[in-house]
């Protein structure tokens, strides 16, 4: 009986060696790397949409973050999870959206695809664009308005109230024509941070 543990260990190690997968020589993908999801149609962007609602008001800010290395929703979701749990954004800029003194922002993030091409988010650009934002599974839907109240009227015609996936917002980014791929590769990085006033 006292040799039973030795015999079991001797029997287990060969079994474990046979059960281990054979190495292919290729490095294992790092956690959070994008997988082999099918490529998106040409002209489609992957965005992390940040919705920042001022608690107790109708005021909602929006920011659209994009990085040329993130080309799938799965890659965006991995970045979103890392940013929300650890507070470290690897590809998207670390950010704090503008909060009025004495107010609190509730921030939600959605990964979406869209055919729109937004100017890079910058911390010092004034909030001067009013968007009705919808983030259904089929992709980003966006309408531009002259003011916040016109957006709210349009939203209420379609739904009773705003939700995380359908809301009126004010933002700093305008929509641009998409640049050629070689120009996008040299685009300067977005600002690293923004502290609220």
Image (cartoon, helix red, strand yellow):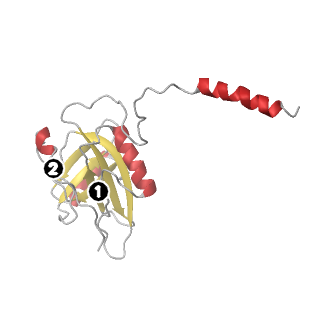
Mark 2 secondary-structure assignment = loop
Residue topped by disc 1: 93
Picture quadrant where residue 52 is located: bottom left
Apparent side of residue 173 relative to residue 164 in the rendered image (left or right): left
- Mark 1 crowd level (few <14, some 14–19, many ≥20, 10 Å Cα): many
- The residue wearing badge 2 is 187
Residue 160 visible in this rendered orientation of the protein: no
Mark 2, other Cα within 10 Å: few <14 / some 14–19 / many ≥20: few
What label does residue 159 carry, if any? none
Q: Residue at x 40, y 44 (%)?
A: 78
- Residue 2 seen from this side: yes
Quadrant of the snapshot with the C terminus: bottom left
Q: Which residue is drawn at 45% across and 54% down?
A: 85
In the image, residue 19 above or below residue 184: above
- N-terminal of the pair, mark 1 or mark 2, is 1
Whole-percent x and y of residue 100?
A: 30, 72
Q: Relative to the observer, which residue lies in front, 106 or 120?
A: 120
Q: What is the C-alpha distance between the residues marked 1 and 2?
A: 14 Å
């Amino acid at each position: 009986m006292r040799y039973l543990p030795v015999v079991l260990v001797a029997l287990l190690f060969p079994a474990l060696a046979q059960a281990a997968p054979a190495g292919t020589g290729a490095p294992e993908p790092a956690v959070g790397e994008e997988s082999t999801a099918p490529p998106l149609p040409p002209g489609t962007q992957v965005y992390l949409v940040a919705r920042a609602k001022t608690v107790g008001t109708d005021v909602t800010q929006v920011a659209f973050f994009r990085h040329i290395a993130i080309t799938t929703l799965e890659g965006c979701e991995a970045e979103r999870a890392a940013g929300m749990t650890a507070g470290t954004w690897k590809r998207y800029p670390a950010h704090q959206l503008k909060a009025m003194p004495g107010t609190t922002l509730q921030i939600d993030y959605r990964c979406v695809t869209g055919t729109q091409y937004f100017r890079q988010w910058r911390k010092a650009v004034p909030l001067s664009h009013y968007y009705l934002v919808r983030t259904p599974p089929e992709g980003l839907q966006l309408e531009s308005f002259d003011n916040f109240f016109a957006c709210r009227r349009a939203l209420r015609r379609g739904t009773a109230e705003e939700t995380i996936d359908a809301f009126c917002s004010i933002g700093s980014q305008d929509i641009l024509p998409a640049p050629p791929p070689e120009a996008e590769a040299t685009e300067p990085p977005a600002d690293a941070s923004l502290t609220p006033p």
